[in-house]
Image (cartoon, helix red, strand yellow):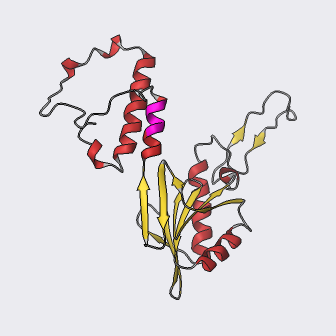
Amino acid sequence: TLYQFDIRGAFLCAPIDREIYLKLPPGYEPPPGKTAKLCKSLYGLKQAPSAFHSLFEAWLLNYGFTAIGGDRVTFLLRRGTSVVLLSIYVDDGIAATNDEKLYREFLKDLGKDFELSDQGKLNWYLGVSVTQDLANKRTTLSQERYVKDVLERFGMTGATPVSTPMEANTHLSVSDSPPAHKLDRKFRREYQRIVGSLMYLAMFTCQTWHSL
């Protein structure tokens, strides 16, 4: 079974490994010759994601998890025949387990040190809809909702679908595109957003790679 949870205020939990001083906002005047030293990370701080990940990874390893892979975002906990496979993306976690009791025990212990939001069984994660059919031991992933959101975002809901989004054997060159200096900033940014959305879709749906 797949579950999901979220760590609230994750970037506010972690200590930082370097000295960082702050310029206080108007209304907060320090004594002459004094300033404020940052003791923990804040949202917007460049070191915040790395600091939180280091803190969270250390907690998992101390709990008994083993890191899997070089990216160190997937962890495995094994207790006899029971396992919890955990994957972390920033402050969102998904877990696969064959023992719900072990998972609930882990979540309870995790909640003692981090503020958690238990979101129950996994149904939506990073733009992917997840349907679990436990009776038939089948899990289905779909990006239909993500595709509809992208079409709405860029005003393409009325577009006509085609089976071949571009002509076969088409060769494009730099000369086919207008010079960069003739494209305004808004147009370039919109184009980059469209391509970025399609590339994220193509990571899961290989049929779109050729068109991109």
Q: Can you name the residue that lies furthest to the top here? A: 182
Residue 39 image point, x, y percent: 73, 50
Find residue 128 and report its horizontal and vertical position in percent: 46, 51
Q: Where is residue 67 drawn, in percent x and y?
A: 48, 70
Quadrant in which the C terminus appears: top left
Front one among 11 and 154: 154
Looking at the image, residue 66 sits to the left or right of residue 62; the answer is left
Q: Nearer the viewer, residue 209 or 76?
A: 209
Vertically, is 111 above or below 51? below
Q: Nearer the viewer, residue 51 or 197?
A: 197
Q: Main secondary structure of the magenta part?
A: helix
The magenta stretch spans residue 14: no
The count of marks equals 0
Q: Residue at x 27, y 43 (%)?
A: 209
74 versus 100 height, above or below: above
The quarter of the displayed image where residue 21 is located = top right
Residue 157 as seen in the image, left or right of residue 51 = left
Q: Residue furthest bottom?
A: 80
Residue that appears at 65% across and 74% down: 104
Q: Which residues are magenta?
A: 148-152
Residue 119, position as x, y percentages in the image: 64, 59
